[in-house]
Image (tube, coloured by chain):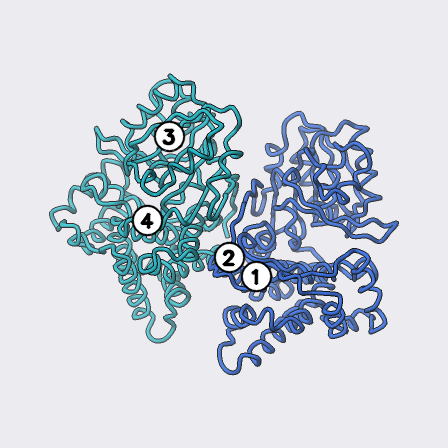
Chain colours: A blue, B cyan
Amino acid sequence: MHNFDFHNPVRVLFGQGQIATLSTLVPEGARVLMLYGGGSIRANGVYDEVKTALAGHTVLEFGGIEPNPTYETLMRAIELVRAERVDFLLAVGGGSVIDGTKFIAAGALLDGDPWSIFEQRAANIHAALPFGAVLTLPATGSEMNSAAVVTRKATLEKRAFASRHVFPRFAVLDPTKTYSLPARQVGNGVVDAFVHVMEQYLTTPVDAKVQDRFAEGLLLTLVEDGPKALSEPENYDVRANLMWTATLALNGLIGVGVPQDWATHMIGHELTALYGLDHAQTLAVVLPAMLRVRREAKRAKLLQYAARVWNLTDGDEDARIDAAIERTEAFFESVGVPTRLSGYGLGKENVEPVLAALEAHRLTKLGEDRGVTLEVSRKVLELAV
Amino acid sequence: MHNFDFHNPVRVLFGQGQIATLSTLVPEGARVLMLYGGGSIRANGVYDEVKTALAGHTVLEFGGIEPNPTYETLMRAIELVRAERVDFLLAVGGGSVIDGTKFIAAGALLDGDPWSIFEQRAANIHAALPFGAVLTLPATGSEMNSAAVVTRKATLEKRAFASRHVFPRFAVLDPTKTYSLPARQVGNGVVDAFVHVMEQYLTTPVDAKVQDRFAEGLLLTLVEDGPKALSEPENYDVRANLMWTATLALNGLIGVGVPQDWATHMIGHELTALYGLDHAQTLAVVLPAMLRVRREAKRAKLLQYAARVWNLTDGDEDARIDAAIERTEAFFESVGVPTRLSGYGLGKENVEPVLAALEAHRLTKLGEDRGVTLEVSRKVLELAV
């Protein structure tokens, strides 16, 4: 096990009815800006519950934060924060709203252009506005971590940052608020959480038994309850397990002291930026191909994954690895997410631009061992067609 | 899954060499009181490493905190804190030193007798001195939680409290510092962590899949690496897995949203107070008998435990349950901890005083369903002779 530094101060309020606790979670006397996306929170009752809980507070609103939140939109929110002397932010939505809120929280207190956060790898963040989150879409884990991804529309750049100053003060997770999600978003969330775990687990073994078992526990839960979330959308326990799993998939815990990969995510980000695929769709496409191409570097962990997640313990090692990857693909498909570029109307001709973007962004040595060169990325993408 | 409120702000610095980080972890300019136990930290090098790391700080010392730390000793430390205007505490040792430090941290800021913390169930704790921990004995999990147990020598009372004000600011965990532990303490630590998990896991199912899988992951790690810690005392990965497991066994995570038992601990506390058994020894004696007596209430979870931790899936349900409990006993014995009262020179005649103590302390309805009446406790203890 490698040395590590783990710190996650986010308070989680979990369960049906927990939105009401906002009345005491949000500091008394705060000037609150409530941030949200396209308006689904009005349809599912979350908007009303939040407003009711905050009846005693001063609450401004900023809606319209898009999936893959853009710098351009978030800068308008920062202007509003400054003009209205907002001193507490409340993100109400999924990972995009929460990611965007992190950028706003840090950017509002910065001199100069907040895009500098990415250029300086967040070294210029010395403080951020306090904020909380009400989660409506289990997927990204943003509600309990300190990272965010922002897209610059003008240049098609999708960039990430992390800073200890942008941990949410609290996250409210009410599984009943996910009942009304469209199937596509549910499936995407399941795949997103699954691949978050895989990026931290399916690397090289360092005998970190707890991290491995925890990762496997999250994967098994997704395999068991992911499809059920689609077939039984109002099964509370299924939704609760899914929601807590997605949060724990990327709150730092399973990634401590172990090698991490993230090559699938980096290639996926370019696919989203260039062709507009949903984040999870890119992961479903890239991960199986990545595992096939990198099977030698990942052999020991692939066998462990085959045994413990898919119960594949008999027969030839390579057959077990093949079967485990096939099961992974079939699982993604079972929650409605295609696993080939062709499933999204893309083909061979779309590979080269992705490689060019990776090169332009200097993403030419990815993976836990920096073994994912452009040549490896090419193989992965060609296999994923 | 039940609703829950999870918050654990403790920062963990894990790995070989991490004691050096104290130089920046402990606030500059603080008047530090370093607290420790019987002096083993002088023999294993921890004392010197801590002093070196804190060379730039003002450091006072208070040694001699005993296993099952006493109110009487801790009150002397509180006097020192007040007299010397100490403003930061550093616990260096195992769970007893850290528990004691929590009592000191809260007690030093209280008007009146700090014993009132127990009488008022910690409701009178509104602040505490900040403190950190350097862990030398993986066992209790105190380094990453907000609970403590203190014994009053004069009255033989062993009482617990918990308060969000007594989370350590940080915990430094260096597995190499556990190499020199006596076998008895290693074995006790393994049993302690195992039973901490069982108290939160072996109850009634509420379909909390992640909590169950995480608990099972910790149990499996203890089963795999616990005996190895004794046979290969300087195996770094084994010690690292054990140390991280013991911390996660009681940092709140696996206990969120699920029923919890703790009857074994309550009965065990009385055995320690009356007969001086080590805490873990009492757990090794009580747990197997408790599982036998409570097998109907715990049937579903016992079968899950048998299957997932001991791989017992064939044959009659009752035979599987019997076998799982026998494996549990054999495991405790394998790390050198006897599982019968007779193993500690106690017999039938020692049962009645324990029941009297439970009654005196109003511990007459214990367990996840309050089903452990005095009559059930009697059966458990008689079976444990």
The amino acid type of the residue labelled 2 equals Gln
Task: Give whichever of A322, B293 is nearer the camera.
Answer: A322
At mark 1, the secondary structure is helix
Chain containing the residue with disc 3: B
At label 4, the amino acid type is Ser
Label 4 near label 3: C-beta < 8 Å?
A: no
Which residue does the numbered mark 3 point to in the structure image? Answer: B103
Residue beneath disc 2: A211
Q: Is residue A139 visible?
A: yes
Q: Residues within 10 Å of mark 2 (few under 14, many from 20)?
A: many
Q: Judge whether B101 appears above or below A361 on screen.
A: above
| Residue that appears at 68% across and 29% down | A57
Looking at the rendered structure, the kind of residue marked 3 is Phe
Disc 3 to disc 2, C-alpha distance = 32 Å
Split into 4 quadrants, where in the image is the C terminus of chain A?
bottom right
Q: Are marks 3 and 2 on the same chain?
A: no
Residue at point 79%, 31% (across, down): A111
Q: Which residue is mark 4?
A: B180
Residue B189 at x, y = what percent?
Answer: 33, 50
Q: Secondary structure at mark 2?
A: helix
Residue shown at the point (28%, 66%) measured from the top left: B322
